[in-house]
Image (tube, coloured by chain):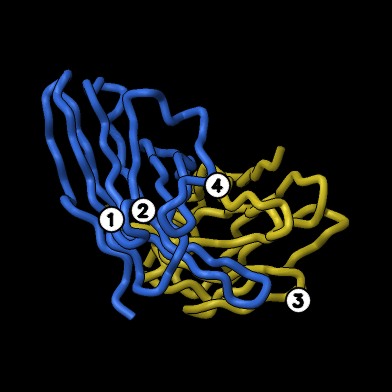
Chain colours: A blue, B yellow
Amino acid sequence: DTGVSQNPRHKITKRGQNVTFRCDPISEHNRLYWYRQTLGQGPEFLTYFQNEAQLEKSRLLSDRFSAERPKGSFSTLEIQRTEQGDSAMYLCASSKLAGSTDTQYFGPGTRLTVL
Amino acid sequence: AQSVTQLGSHVSVSEGALVLLRCNYSSSVPPYLFWYVQYPNQGLQLLLKYTSAATLVKGINGFEAEFKKSETSFHLTKPSAHMSDAAEYFCAVSPRMDTGRRALTFGSGTRLQVQP
């Protein structure tokens, strides 16, 4: 299997601009997750898709954030009107149910810097 | 609500010494537990997972962890540290499959330094 891929790896933007990140999961993984990781902290869950359905959303996912997975394959995460507090590493993970377990495999992340 | 506490944000050991990274969880029912490792500017790599089979779990790179329900712990160990083990380690807890929820809850991480 090729792993989870994320693009771009780095993004620098000015406050107020919109940004969009892409995640390509491991093939045949029907579940896809987005997390945010700030410096010195563990990842925090943002949202989760099973196929194209968005099934779970965190309180962290404000109305400036939107995620889609239109065909149940790749996903995009858009942040509108970026703020300096949005600066973080955005991690994508994917999984598929195997027996009773559902192990999440992570991509390399997209590091966002908002100036 | 589930939570994970990692005791010690930084741990330093000598090359060849025992590695012990501590993780305690809080959950109303026995959860699934994971250890991930993160190298600088990279994503997270799965080291090992506990899913209610054997309580002693062996992972990659010589790491293992023991689930102790009475202590609500899932500490990570390695008998002999290598320089290449220097990284950030995260313990995570997942709801059980029958809850319908899938979000991992991570601890704040432990940075392992290995001294020559």
Say which residue appears at 50% left-offset and 50% top-offset. B110
Pointers 1 and 4 within a single chain: no
Callout 2 touching callout 4 (CB < 8 Å) = no
For numbered disc 4, what is the local secondary structure?
strand
Amino acid, disc 3? Ala
Give the distance between the C-alpha atoms of the residues marked 2 and 4, in whole angstroms.
15 Å
Give the number of the mark in front: 2 or 4. Answer: 2
Q: Chain of mark 1?
A: A
Q: Earlier in the sequence, mark 2 or mark 1?
A: 1
Of residue B41 and residue A14, the one placed in the foreground of this image is: A14
Q: Earlier in the sequence, mark 3 or mark 4?
A: 3
x and y percentages locating residue B10 in the rendered image: 49, 47
x and y percentages locating residue B91 in the rendered image: 57, 54
Say which residue appears at 34% left-offset and 73% top-offset. A27
Give the distance between the C-alpha atoms of the residues marked 2 and 3, in whole angstroms.
28 Å
Amino acid, disc 4? Phe
* Mark drawn on residue B41: none
The residue at which mark 4 appears reads as B106
Residue A89 showing in the rendered view? yes
The residue at which mark 1 appears reads as A23
* Mark drawn on residue B53: 3
Amino acid, disc 2? Cys
Quadrant (top left, top right, bottom left, bottom right) of the N terminus of chain A: bottom left
Q: Chain of mark 4?
A: B
Give the number of the mark in front: 1 or 4. Answer: 1
The residue at which mark 2 appears reads as A92
- Tell me: B8 left or right of A36: right
Give the distance between the C-alpha atoms of the residues marked 2 and 1, in whole angstroms.
6 Å
